[in-house]
Image (tube, grey):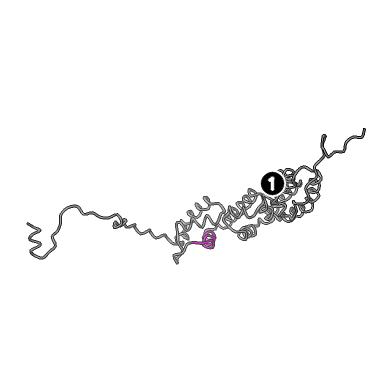
Amino acid sequence: MPEVDDQRRGRTPQRRGPVLRRARDRRPPTEPAPASLPTLDALLAPEGRAALEAIVRRRGGRAAAAVRDLAAGWRRADGGAPGDADLRALLESHDLARSFARRERADALHALRAAGGVKARAAEVLEVDLAGFDEILARTGAAAEAEAIREERRAALKRRATLAERARLVLDEAARLRDLGLLAEFEADLRSRLPDHLEALRSSGTGPLETALARSLTVPGARARALAERLGLDLSGPSPRRRKGRGDASRPGRRT
């Protein structure tokens, strides 16, 4: 028999049958190496203009998004990902810089209008920080128009002058007011007007002062307390006097 012959010759007998392999011993199939991307020099050729125009049509004046498209299809000569400077150099080489700047200007102003004049929100849409957004406005000559948009929004907010309106704005829209330069003004206005309002509520005897303030401003009690803390107003004070009504035992009797 083969196994006996193998033993006689000093060799380990070979067992026939299926070979079992554990899952942890299995090796995943080798992934093919990714194809190397062409360099940006390819876009300097005449046919590169069409590729750039396609990116601009797709991304408009949003440079950050256009740079991402470049990075998805091309690499710098040193192997690094393209940046904003590379995009603008390519646009300049194909005489597309002016048209792109017009798109940047239009997109920046549109984003600012949609954001209610708030630069921080508009900058998020364009995927830049505040300094980058201001740089776009300055470079494209849109700073004056942008400020007009912001001033129009400031005027609209200033018309919301009741205590309840301003209280809700300070509580819920502090970031927007700060961006527009109105937060300190609105807080100062509330800080000067609310003490008299609180005194009137205290004198009216309509219940705990915090509850009365919340009701008068149409905000939850916790929000009224947060506003008072923010403005340094004291809601503890003396308990409001309760109005005497008909049949009140403390009411002096009528003389007979």
Image mark count = 1
| Magenta part of the chain | 82-92
Q: Secondary structure at mark 1?
A: helix
- Residue 136 horizontal side relative to residue 29, left or right: right
Which image quarter: residue 7?
bottom left
Q: Residue at x 14, y 58 (%)?
A: 14
- Residue 117 horizontal side relative to residue 96, left or right: right
Q: Residue furthest front?
A: 256
Residue toward you, 185 or 21: 21
- The residue to which callout 1 is attached is 221
Q: Residue furthest top?
A: 256
Q: Is residue 38 above or below residue 213?
A: below
* Amino acid type at mark 1: Gly
If the image is split into quadrants, where does the N terminus sit?
A: bottom left
Residue toward you, 200 or 26: 200
If the image is split into quadrants, where does the C terminus sit?
A: top right
Which image quarter: residue 75?
bottom left
Residue 239, given in percent of the width and then of the height, sits at: 77, 48
Q: Residue at x 88, y 36 (%)?
A: 253
Residue 245, given in percent of the width and then of the height, sits at: 82, 37
* Secondary structure mainly formed by the magenta segment: helix
Residue toward you, 177 or 198: 198
Residue 121 shown in magenta: no
Please tell me how crowded label 1 is: few (under 14), some (14-19), or many (20+) other residues with Cα within 10 Å: some
